Amino acid sequence: MTSAIASRTASVPLGRAALMAAGPLWATVSLAQVATRDGFDLMRHPLSLLSTGSLGWLQITNFVVAGLLMVAGAGALDGTWAPRLTRVAGLGMIAAGLLVMDPGGGFPADHPEVPATMSRHAIGHMAAGTITFAALIAACYVLARRAPARGSAAAAVIAGTALLAGDLWAMSGGAAGTLTLAIGAITAMLYVSWAARPSAARTR
C-alpha cells in the first residue's frame, strides 16, 4: 500500500503538481470571494479589487501563491517558450498581488467613488496585469501549436482568445467588461494548469 502511494506521488513531480494546482486554486479562491464578500459585483468590479478592504489579504495571498506555483511548475511544460511565458506570467501574478489596485467604484463599501488619480502601486498593478495577460495569451497559443490532438489545440486557442477578447473588451469600457476579463483570465489559467497534466506530457 505504501509503495503504491509512493509510486503515484513520484509519477507527478512537485513542479508539475504545482502548475496543475495554480489555475484551479486561483479560480476557486477568487470565485469564493466573489460569492461571499459584501458589495462585490463582478459585473462592475475586477477580481483584483478583492485585494482591497479588510479581507484583501486573501486575494493578495491568492495572487502570490498562484504566481509562485506557476514559476515553480513552468518547467513541466514542453518546449522552450511555453515554460518561459508561464514563468513570466507567474512573476506578473506575484507583482500584481503585491501591488494592490486602488479601492473605489463601490468596493469596499466605504469607497463609492472611482479614484480621480491612480496611486503608484495601482499603476504597478496595471503594468503587472498587462504583462501577465500578454504572457498567458502567448503561452496558450504556443501550447496550441504543440498540442498532441486537435481538441487540445482548439482548447488552447479558445483559452488564449477568451483572455485576449475579454481584456480588450474590458479596456475598451465595454458592458460587463470586468466579467469578460474574469472569464478570460480564469479560462487561460485553467488551461495552462490542464496542459501540465502527466497524460499531456506522455502524448507529446
Image (spheres, rainbow, N blue to C red):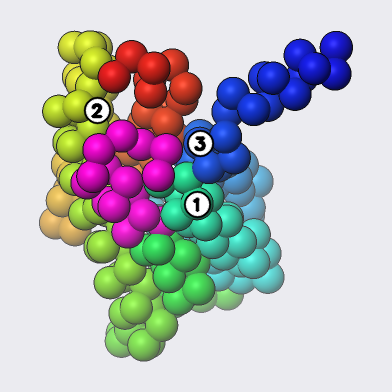
Residue 201 placement, left or right of 130: right
Residue at 37% from the left image edge and 28% from the top image edge: 195
Kindly report the secondary structure that dominates the magenta region of the rendered protein. helix
Whether 99 is drawn above or below 51: the answer is below
Residue at 53% from the left image edge and 42% from the top image edge: 15
- Can residue 123 be seen by looking at this rendering? yes
In the picture of the structure, the residue carrying the numbered disc 3 is 16
Percent x, y of residue 61:
61, 61
Marks 3 and 2, how far apart in space?
18 Å
Percent x, y of residue 159:
26, 32
The quarter of the picture where residue 203 lies is: top left
Mark 3 vs mark 2, foreground winner is: 3
Percent x, y of residue 6:
75, 24
Marks 2 and 1, how far apart in space?
21 Å
In front here: 115 or 86? 86
Q: Which residues are magenta?
A: 75-90
In front here: 8 or 31? 8
Per the image, is 27 magenta? no
Residue 175 placement, left or right of 121: left
Quadrant assignment for the N terminus: top right
- Which comes sooner in the sequence, label 3 or label 2? 3
In the picture of the structure, the residue carrying the numbered disc 1 is 72
Residue at 17% from the left image edge and 42% from the top image edge: 165
Task: Tell me the element at label 2.
Answer: helix
- Which comes sooner in the sequence, label 1 or label 3? 3
| Crowdedness near tag 2: few (<14), some (14–19) or many (≥20) residues, C-alpha within 10 Å | many
